[in-house]
Image: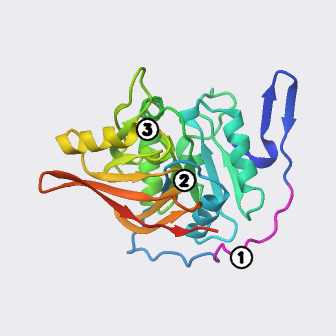
Amino acid sequence: MMKRRDFLVTTTLGSVGVGAAQLPFDPLITPDAPPATSHARATRKILIAGGGFNTAFIRYMAMLTGKKRPRICYLPSASADSATGTLSFFKNCATLDVEPHAQNVFIESLTQQQGWDEVFLSMDAIVCSGGNTLNQQAIWKAQGIDVVLREAWDKGIVLGGASAGSLCWFDEGTTDSRPKALSIVKCLGFLKGSHSPHYNAEAGRRPLYHKLIGSGEMQPGYACDNDAGIYFEENEVKRVVATRDGAKVYYVSVVGGQVVEKTMEPERLA
């Protein structure tokens, strides 16, 4: 597991370190929440975006943790542990009062001394990268990471991400993870129903989503434009948000035998 101060990006020219300057307090992040009583169960929280989980989304995620300086872990499994994506995550965190970490899955036991439970359950939030959702799911299941993420969710650790990092939490959705065409992928099922990311950015997304839901091949669900997203508590939509004017969220279902797309107007995140 890497902290921001330890992260090295290896290139053909050598290694470039990422410094660890002390960051100022972010007033948008609330103080530590009081400890839960023994009989209270933590609220389960997921924050997704159709694409573009940028600084504004990470700031909001940090606020949702209720911690002064939350530990946020980036999990780039879907991008094959891309160093470029990890560096972008650290850059997005640079102006926030958070403690950023990254955890690769292409590891070996000599240097990976902590178990998945030790890593992820020590965090306040986990951001999953975009990339290949099908491969992400296969790796998580082979490694038992899916089980640990369920435990993290049950503990109230805030989960989230965009693209593959949003799709992964639902029962199912549309993916470009296979050759030739968009297809269906089955995911973790923390959030019930289906999901389509990149709804405005890729021409094939909307017609396929309508077709699959209309035929009953896929459950009704939520479609998100890039830069728009949803905050869920349990399986309830608590807030619809966006970081760009015009970015929207939709609920797609069948009513009276017809596919209906209901627009969910978002609030603008700073």
Residue beneath disc 1: 27
Give the colour scheme shown.
rainbow
Specify which label sits upstream in the sequence, 2 or 3.
2
Q: Mark 1 or mark 2: which is in front? A: 1
Where residue 114 sits in the image (x, y, percent)? 62, 41
Q: Is residue 42 visible?
A: no
Please state, as top left, top right, bottom left or bottom right, where the C terminus lies in the image: bottom right
What is the number of the mark on residue 203? 3
Disc 3 marks which amino acid? Ala
Taking the spot 59% from the left edge, 66% from the top edge, the residue there is 60
Residue 27: image quadrant is bottom right
Q: Is residue 214 above or below residue 35?
A: above
Q: CA distance from mark 1 to mark 2?
A: 26 Å
Disc 1 marks which amino acid? Pro
Q: Nearer the viewer, residue 65 or 110?
A: 65
Label 3 SS: loop
Specify which label sits upstream in the sequence, 1 or 3.
1
Label 1 SS: loop
Label 2 SS: loop
Q: Which residues are magenta?
A: 21-30
What is the number of the mark on residue 4? none
- Magenta region, mostly helix, strand or loop? loop
Specify which label sits upstream in the sequence, 1 or 2.
1
Where residue 83 sits in the image (x, y, percent)? 70, 34
Where residue 167 sits in the image (x, y, percent)? 43, 45
